[in-house]
Image (cartoon, grey):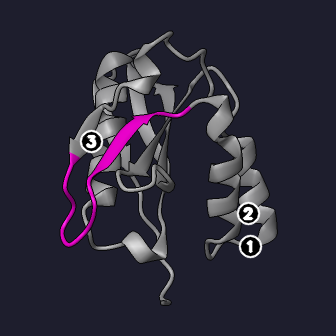
Amino acid sequence: MGRQARAGKDDIPLRALHPVDGPALSVRVATAADRPGIEEMLKDSWLSEEDAARALSTLDGPSIRAVIALSGDEGSMVGFGVLRIDVGTDGAPIANVVHLAVRRTMRGRGVGAALLEGLRMEAVAARCRELRIATRSRPGP
């Protein structure tokens, strides 16, 4: 999304697995065509409308890497993760996970772990020396 899709490679899952009590899923690099699905998931999250719009605006830019998780049964998007590549104080690239979302119906089934693995692979590809994750949560269903 922040960079051009690699021709032919974006259709190959980064990882395929069988989540607990659910269908197989795959994780792949997100493309511009995935933006409406990501936007829908952001609107369905606990974020305010303003925060969701701000999160969507972060998907653009050369330092952004995004991955999506697709359900193996129907190929629908069940989660996404966004990585921002920053420059550390020593000049080396550092990866920061800035968004990670999983559909409510798929939580607890390994989707988040698969997305983190996809983001880790993107950080390795970008030669990052660190992968940072800051969390915040909101109680709810």
Number of residues whose C-alpha sits closer than 10 Å to that of mark 3, classed few (under 14), some (14–19) or many (20 or more): some
- Is 134 on the left or on the right of 18, as rendered? right
Q: Provide the secondary structure element on which disc 3 rests.
A: helix
Image point (53%, 34%), residue name = 30
Q: Residue furthest top?
A: 7
- Across and down, in percent, residue 13 comes to 33, 32
Which of the two discs, 3 and 1, sits closer to the camera? 3
Q: Earlier in the sequence, mark 3 or mark 2?
A: 2
Magenta stretch holds residue 26: yes
> In the rendered structure, which segment of residues is drawn in magenta?
17-30
Residue beneath label 3, please?
117
Question: Vertically, is 130 above or below 141?
Answer: above
Task: Evaluate if marks 3 and 1 touch, with contact meaning CB atoms under 8 Å apart.
Answer: no
User: Spatial distance from mark 3 to mark 1, Cα to Cα?
Assistant: 28 Å
Q: Quadrant of the N terminus?
A: top right
Which of the two discs, 3 and 2, sits closer to the camera? 3
Image point (64%, 51%), residue name = 37
- Across and down, in percent, residue 71 comes to 39, 54
Residue beneath label 2, please?
51
Magenta stretch holds residue 102: no
Q: Provide the secondary structure element on which disc 1 rests.
A: loop
Mark seen at residue 102:
none
Nearer to us in this view, 89 or 106: 106
Q: Provide the secondary structure element on which disc 2 rests.
A: helix
Number of residues whose C-alpha sits closer than 10 Å to that of mark 2, classed few (under 14), some (14–19) or many (20 or more): few
Report the amino acid beneath label 2. Answer: Asp
Count of marks, rendered view: 3
Q: Earlier in the sequence, mark 3 or mark 1?
A: 1
Residue beneath label 1, please?
48
Task: Evaluate if marks 2 and 1 touch, with contact meaning CB atoms under 8 Å apart.
Answer: yes
User: Spatial distance from mark 3 to mark 2, Cα to Cα?
Assistant: 25 Å
